[in-house]
Amino acid sequence: MEFFKSNILFDISVSAIGAILFLILRIVGQKKHFKIKSLFLITIFAVYFIVRILNSVAQPLKFDLLDSSLDLLEALLLALCVIKAIMFALVELFFYSKKGVEIPKIFQDTLFVLLYFILLMVILKEVLNINLTSILTTSAVLTMVLGLSIQDNLSNLFSGLAIQMEKPFATGEWVSFEGTIGKVKELSWRSVKLLTLENDLLIIPNNKIIKETVVNYNRPTHLHISKFNIGVAYRHPPNKVKDTILEVLKNEKDISHEPKPIIRLIDYGDFAITYEIRYYISNFNRFLQIEDSITTKLWYAFKREDITIPFPIRNVNLRTVTDEKERKKRETEIAERAAFLKSIEFLAPLSDDDTLKLAQNGRSLSFCTGEQVIKEGTDGDSMYVILQGDVDVFINDATGDRKKISTLHAGDFFGERSLMTGAKRNATIVATTDCIFFVIDKENFKNVISSHDGVLRQISDILSRRELELKDKRQEVSKPVTSTQIQENSKKIFHRIKDFLGF
């Protein structure tokens, strides 16, 4: 006991340990950010404390080798404790906690190695009487070997410091290096780690990355121009192609619409006119999904507009198909479509011949999942019958909020109000699966209905009821629509239909 009491260094160490442990435990109880680092620091101090006691007990035994070993271990642990405590206080408590500044890990590691190396030289001289400085300066061979062995590490270290000072990229940003795109996961004294699009970890030495060109997709702003090319057949007017592409981009929610997308004709190729599609995105990590969504919707939009994407391959198909077979196939398709139209409520009053005419003169359109078919408030003069797929119906309620009111399936229809009266679309329709629609436009319907005044009144009644029901849903009214309301509204719709169709 007398030894512990007389050893001033031991008393100071124990006091320092107690004070630091108290401070750390207090911090741990308040902030979870420091938990792991503070527990590591506590562990180091505990190990040092145990070694210190063992060294104090072993000193009276006079074993020189044991004494020198324990002295060295104690000194190394004490140095580690002191450096870790200082760095913890500066980096975590002062800069991070009080100033809100996060010191890069490479600076922390460099400072730690530098301080520990200085203390190591002092410890070796004081404990083992080894002057490392004189050994390095007097031994040219050793100095050369040491320099060559750490050449790459020093190069990586100073390159890493240069990266940290210049800050060409930061953790979490997307960059491209030698054609590989990845997200920066970590910057250390030796390397930069990227998580690639294939979910692989790419480790690039600092001395290599500082010599090559690096593209940062998050600077100077998060807005990034994404682009791709598409070829279209020569027979299509460029302005029509551009308008079709812009309409697809206009309804793509994941791109930025300010600045606006740009479509450029860039080449007259051997098989196609090539267009460059440029648009802005603010979320770069979704650029592949966004491009996939746009290219998929372009295929459906081009098909609806009868725009061809050519390819330099010639297919020669030899088959025997007579005109009679083709005619019968076409008649069968029209008859099936006419029967389908006949089953629709407001078209039921039409005769079989009139329904057949509608089926002959209508057209089919395809939409992909997620595409907007029609938008509330826009002009329209056509009706859509769902031949295949499902759609969701959205309206803006009394407060202006968009809400879903129903889902339509194959056999349902929408847009009949615009077809009959030319009124603006009263709902937004979005495809929830790949869909095929049969479209009846104004001219087609006008040619069929012009001589059927009685049928027109029946259709007016049906449209009146549907319009009033939709109005109640918009206003969230639960009371049923009366027959008087239907008749009064039907008269108005009847006259609107006649005026619109020009009867």
Image (spheres, rainbow, N blue to C red):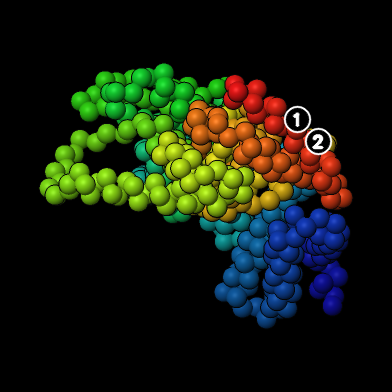
Disc 2, SS: helix
Q: Quadrant of residue 485?
A: top right
Viewer can see residue 134: no
Look at 59% across and 45% down and name the residue there: 349
Residue located at (57% from left, 57% from top): 124
Q: Position of residue 317 (x, y in %)?
A: 15, 46
255 or 237: which is nearer to us? 237
Which one is nearer the viewer's eye here, 78 or 486? 486
Q: Amino acid at mark 1?
A: Lys
Few, some or many residues within 10 Å of mark 2 (<14, 14–19, 20+): few
| Helix, strand or loop status at disc 1 | helix
Disc assigned to residue 7: none
Task: Count the labels in the image.
Answer: 2
Which residue is at 58% across, 48% downward?
348
Residue 164 lies, with reference to residue 39, above or below; the image says: above
Residue 107 horizontal/vertical position (percent): 60, 42
Q: Residue at x 37, y 49 (%)?
A: 333
Q: Are marks 1 and 2 in contact (CB under 8 Å)?
A: yes
Q: Is residue 43 above or below residue 378?
A: below
Q: Quadrant of the C terminus?
A: top right
Question: Quick check: 499 left or right of 307?
Answer: right
Picture coordinates of residue 247, whole percent (x, y): 51, 28
Report which residue position mark 2 lands on. 488
Q: Quadrant of the N terminus?
A: bottom right
Q: Amino acid at mark 2?
A: Glu
Residue closer to the observer: 454 or 391:
454
Disc 1 from disc 2: Cα separation: 7 Å
Which residue is labeled 1 in the image? Answer: 492
- Residue sitting at the far bottom: 61
Residue 334 is situated, as x and y percent measured from the top left of the image, at: 39, 46
